[in-house]
């Protein structure tokens, strides 16, 4: 009889619930981001003309004249019976607007040839910018062109704002935050600069650019 009672007490005793076993979740998967592939630049070409060999890019020949650009981002055009070539500075190559490089151009007027960006012809004169972020305006029968400092383009890249030009009588100035008096114009050289007018005096200041630009590779050259 006693074994039966002991068995009944054992079966009727409350059981202690075991703590749930934490489910083993798979470790988070590490997504590897592929490094950008280096830009494959076209190989230069060599052209034989009039007993000499010229090598480079965008090579052109006209009569006895042969010339090539030094980089695949340069331009060569035949104008007024000659071949003119021009290569943009590296800051213009590495930091084009919209990360798409557009080839510069050459223009001619009255036998004078100039190459660059945003080229303009006015009153028998032709001028261009050295970078895509420059500006050219006409002022008193002449063209005035201005480019932001390279340090600004290195810092801001495709967000570099276009500068302005402001005139006062025969004076003209180009840059950022320009201010003018009756015969004086002053501008900051950087978008972070500042110009102030105090009575008859204009004062502009630009803080130094402290960014160190590390290039990983240039954009694709234009076809």
Image (cartoon, rainbow, N blue to C red):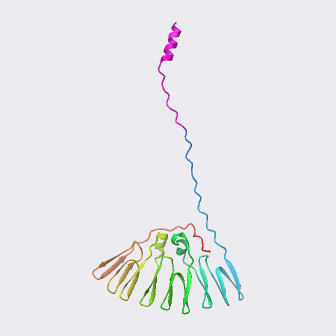
Most extreme residue toward the bottom is: 110
- Could you say where residue 56 lies in the image, as x and y percent from the top left? 65, 79
Q: In this image, 129 relative to 61: left or right?
A: left
Quadrant location, the C terminus = bottom right
Question: Which residue appears at 67% of the width and 80% of the height?
Answer: 55
Question: Which residue appears at 61% of the width and 82% of the height?
Answer: 76
> Which quarter of the picture shows residue 89?
bottom right
Residue 146 seen in render: no
Residue 26, relative to residue 125: is it above or below?
above
Q: Nearer the viewer, residue 107 or 215?
A: 107
Q: In this image, 12 relative to 222: left or right?
A: left
- Could you say where residue 27 lies in the image, as x and y percent from the top left? 56, 44
Question: Which residue appears at 48% of the width and 73% of the height?
Answer: 153
Please tell me whether residue 29 belongs to the stretch shown in magenta.
Answer: no
Q: How many marks?
A: 0
Residue 25, relative to residue 157: is it above or below?
above
Q: Which residues are magenta?
A: 1-23
Q: In this image, 62 relative to 173: left or right?
A: right
- Could you say where residue 212 lies in the image, as x and y percent from the top left? 49, 68
- Could you say where residue 189 lies in the image, as x and y percent from the top left? 41, 77
């Amino acid at each position: 009889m006693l074994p039966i009672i002991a068995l009944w007490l054992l079966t009727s005793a409350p059981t202690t619930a075991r703590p749930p076993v934490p489910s083993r979740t798979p470790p988070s998967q590490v997504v590897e981001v592929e490094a950008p592939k280096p830009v494959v630049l076209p190989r230069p070409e060599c052209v034989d003309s009039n007993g000499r060999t010229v090598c480079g890019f965008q090579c052109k020949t006209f009569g006895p004249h042969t010339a090539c650009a030094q980089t695949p981002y340069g331009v060569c055009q035949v104008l007024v019976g000659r071949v003119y070539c021009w290569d943009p500075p590296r800051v213009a190559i590495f930091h084009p607007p919209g990360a798409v490089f557009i080839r510069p151009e050459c223009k001619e007027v009255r036998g004078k040839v100039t190459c660059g960006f945003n080229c303009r012809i006015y009153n028998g004169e032709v001028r261009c910018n050295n970078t895509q972020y420059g500006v050219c305006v006409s002022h008193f029968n002449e063209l005035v062109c201005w480019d932001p400092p390279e340090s600004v383009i290195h810092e801001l890249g495709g967000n570099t704002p276009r500068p302005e030009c402001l005139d006062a009588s025969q004076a003209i100035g180009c840059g950022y935050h320009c201010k003018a008096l009756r015969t004086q114009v002053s501008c900051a050289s950087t978008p972070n600069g500042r110009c102030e007018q105090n009575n008859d005096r204009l004062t502009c200041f630009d803080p130094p650019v402290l960014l160190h630009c590390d290039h990983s590779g240039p954009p694709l050259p234009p076809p």
